[in-house]
Amino acid sequence: MHPIFRSRRWLIYLAAWIPVMALLVYVTSTTARMSWLAAAEILAPGCFVSAFVCLSPWYLCRARPLGLATMGNLGSTFLGAAAIAGVLLAGATELMAESLAVPVSGGQLALWFAVGALLYLLSVGLHYAALGAIASRESERQAAEARTLAREAQLQALKFQLNPHFLFNSLHSIAALATLDGSRAREMCVRLSGFLRASLALGDREVIPLREELALARSYLEVEQVRFSDRLRVEADVEQTCEECAVPALLLQPLVENAVKHGVAGMVEPGSIHLAARRGAGLVTITIENAFDPDMPPPPKLGMGLNHVRRRLEVRYGEQGELQAGPAEGVYRVSLRFPCEPSMASISRA
């Protein structure tokens, strides 16, 4: 349904046709030497039909956005439709004139045809302008929602960083290592401080290069790797071509956190986390795989982090942002796919 019919704006739209009809009546009465009343009687049905015909471009404009690749096809399509609109206005007016026994000339028919075609083409331009305004408002809304989600992610990261459970485990591991292996204890202190410093350094940045996002994920995993010792192995396979693609800040943090807390931490035997990033056809694909105990029931809060990441992808990239998660081939796999945006362009967009 055309959006104009969702409210009483259609009354305003019909009222806007009154000046158009008045101008046609004036031109017709002047050139055909007929009274204003007679001209209004024969033109009223045709203008009414044209008013609704000029709403039809909405559906075609929405289905065929403007673009250099489609300009030729769109031009021929709209010119053909404009010719039909001109025939409808001229034909309806001629039929009304014949029913009222009002003579019309070929010049009058040509005038009505031209007016009908021009009005249709004008409506095409107005519909594209309206769609552009709608798209602009939607883009602004999505950008605002993306900023809100990014701030929420930062707050969640800060809460995680200051999570007493996480800090207690880290400090407990440092204390235990201090008596057994002083060098490892110092190493864990350095890595823990580096992770906290890197997280806090994000500040108000809403998008960062994938290189920085991966570095932050590795920094977190390094802290956990020292804590779990040989029980946790981390593998990374990242293509350099995708490192400068921009991503929402802290996008991977909930995923690597889940991989440790709900994967390796629940296993008795050593487990691994594999982090990979690929770029192809303008898209970046990031995969996080972690070992897990298949006999353990899935934790109830696992889906919260996944849903948050999925929502952030949808808000920023629309249908091009995708997240898939689930057990596969003996591991739990999370796969993200989204367009590769240059860092500077993405920052300006945010």
Image (cartoon, rainbow, N blue to C red):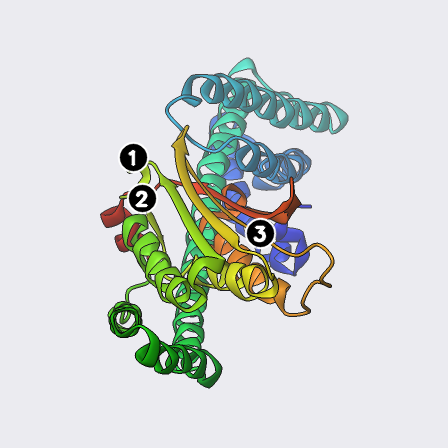
Instruction: Kindly state the secondary structure of the residue where label 2 is placed.
Output: loop
Q: Which amino acid does label 3 sit on?
A: Ala
Q: Which numbered tag is attached to residue 291?
A: 3
Q: Which numbered tag is attached to residue 154?
A: none
Q: Which amino acid does label 1 sit on?
A: Thr
Residue furthest out toward the top:
106
**Crowd band around label 3 with a 10 angstrom C-alpha radius: few (<14), some (14–19), many (20+):** many
Q: Would you identify the image quadrant in which residue 263 lies?
A: bottom right
Q: Residue at x 70, y 63 (%)?
A: 298
Residue 176: image x %, image y %? Answer: 39, 80
Name the residue tied to disc 1.
241
Q: Would you identify the image quadrant in which residue 310 lies?
A: bottom right
Residue 282: image x %, image y %? Answer: 39, 32
Query: How far apart, in angstroms, are the residues tagged by discs 1 and 3?
Result: 28 Å
Residue 260: image x %, image y %? Answer: 51, 62
Q: Residue at x 52, y 31 (%)?
A: 120
Name the residue tied to disc 2.
245
